[in-house]
Amino acid sequence: MPSIRFNRNRVRLKRILGIRARLALLAVILVAPLMLERARSLETTRARQIALATEEFSTVAKHSADTQREIIMSVETLLKSSAYIRASTAGIARSCDMLRASLPLNLPWIRSIMIAGQDGRVQCSTDNNNVGLDVSNRPYFRKAQDTRNFVFSDFMLARQEQKPIIMAAYPVSAITGEPDAVLLASVNLAWMSKIMSNLDGRPGISAVLVDSTGTVLAASGDESSLIGQSLDSAPLLSAIAETAMSSDRREGSISFAAADGSRRAVTFTRIADTGSRLILSIDETRVTAAIDQEIRTAYLQAGFVCLFVLLGALIAAEHLIVKPINLLAATAKRFGHGDWLARATTARLPAEFMPLAKAFNAMATKLAQRERELVEANDRLTVIASMDMLSGLANRRGFQSRLDFEWIKAQQHGGELALLMIDVDHFKLFNDTYGHPEGDACLAQLGETLSNIAAAATGFAGRYGGEEFCLLVPNAGADRALEIGEIVRAAVLELGLPHATSGHQCVTVSVGVACARPNPSLRPVDLIEAADAALYAAKHRGRNAVVAHGFIQMVEEGSDAVRAS
């Protein structure tokens, strides 16, 4: 009993310390130091990542503010150039035409440009729906007339479309010095929000552009619902709304603890020539949490790498060692069960297994060659078994096999099939008179003659038994079958084989012809019986004759003819 238990434990230990386990252990030994070094490097770079993140957010905020300034400057530049055109052009119609032609296509944030008269009524516009509007009561219009300078409005809704816009105004009087029209431009707030889209998806960051009253003009994607609302409605920004809006400084920063306990740093930047401000809020807690999460993810990835290395080692052992051995074993098993085509696929085996696979394949090739030689010998015996050695034609079994094949073929293609049953007249008397050797010679000559006729007619000839022969002709109708039957009868007569006991003094044959179009209601035996019946009729018509059987309406009316000589 102790020896049996020891042997069992030994077998289990071998399984545990098998190829797979050894490769897995080796992989862990190689990968573990790399993973530890990776963990140390992550801890070292953590502080640097936080600093870089803060610097990046500041750069993004500055870029957004600069881009907003560029938008305001492009609007101001366009209005000033349009004002110069208006000041130097006589007539409102001419001014409007030049105004429409001067609107650049590469400034999609400008929705429309208008010219409003001194009375505040829009005289012309790049959008015809704006013509006739009265903007005399709009603060930005009155301020532009009073200050004779560029004015940027606060948030408002377009009167007709009820869409949020801001307006820019520049009076022509700033150029001429005299009361004159005012150039107006409506700015698309959606485009101003797109400029801030580079802040989307950054955790802990919120950015808004507000006008002088604290109304949100534009916001990054996750804050877009604030557009048109007061800054006080944003809980995390309301705490600095008053400080940011009341400050005269161009930019400033505030740090505070939010109501939820998070640390926040808020930076506000004033947009030049306007009362608008860009406010950027950074949740320091969330920013740090994101970096910490990245480090935790890195540790998790390191763990997954170790796991994948272990799995890779197991898979490598499976594919490089275990699977090739199983493949060779399975191939040998198939070959042992009689599958002589079984070969070891060398393309799927590692190079180390190639010699073994090639040796196995060489052995299998030799054994398969012997198997093919045996099959060929068996095929030759099968052919010999289907041949009549005396006449050189197919014997009854071979002929029956060919008839079954041609029957199925004709049934599939809707063709006709003709069968000629041929019997040597008074052959028993021929044997009694001349002896069996002469009788065999006679049958051999008849076989050669029928073989030649069958080849010419694309048919198949056979010896059905004794002195009876048959000729199968595919795709032949009744008339063609009778014609071939007459050829057979005449060819045998022309041989001139002497037959003293025959009325014709030479060997003759009687031929029975039957023709059918195979279908599911007929069988090959029906065609044979019909040809036999026709042969019987030819015998009774005096022999040396050809008779066609009127077989199931396969022969045209009147073709049941008898041809005799």
Image (cartoon, rainbow, N blue to C red):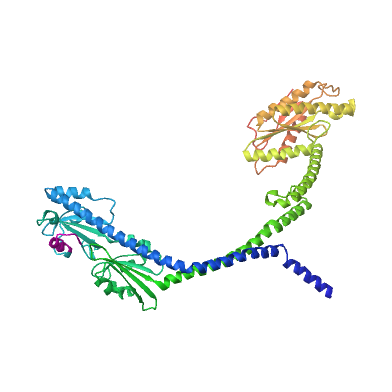
In the rendered view, tell whether residue 544 sits above or below residue 175: above
In the rendered view, tell whether residue 84 sits above or below residue 556: below
The mark total stands at 0
**Image location of residue 3, percent across then percent down:** 84, 73
Give yes or no for residue 287 being in the magenta stretch: no
Looking at the rendered image, the quarter that the N terminus falls into is bottom right
Q: Give the extent of the magenta segment.
A: 140-151
Give yes or no for residue 143 being in the magenta stretch: yes
Q: In this view, does 66 lie to the left or right of 335?
A: left
**Residue occupying the point 70% across, 26% down:** 456
Q: Nearer the viewer, residue 107 or 4?
A: 107
**Residue occupying the point 25% across, 65% down:** 276
**Residue occupying the point 86% across, 24% down:** 501
Looking at the rendered image, the quarter that the C terminus falls into is top right
Q: Which of 457 and 206 is in front in this view?
A: 206
Question: Main SS type for the magenta part?
Answer: helix
Q: In this view, does 252 lie to the left or right of 453?
A: left
Q: Which of 231 and 558 is in front in this view?
A: 231
**Image location of residue 227, percent across then percent down:** 29, 67
Is residue 363 visible to us here? yes
**Image location of residue 265, percent across then percent down:** 36, 72
Is residue 542 visible to us here? no
**Image location of residue 210, percent across then percent down:** 27, 67
Q: In this view, does 137 lie to the left or right of 489?
A: left
Q: In which quarter of the image is residue 448?
A: top right
Q: Is residue 509 left or right of residue 120?
A: right
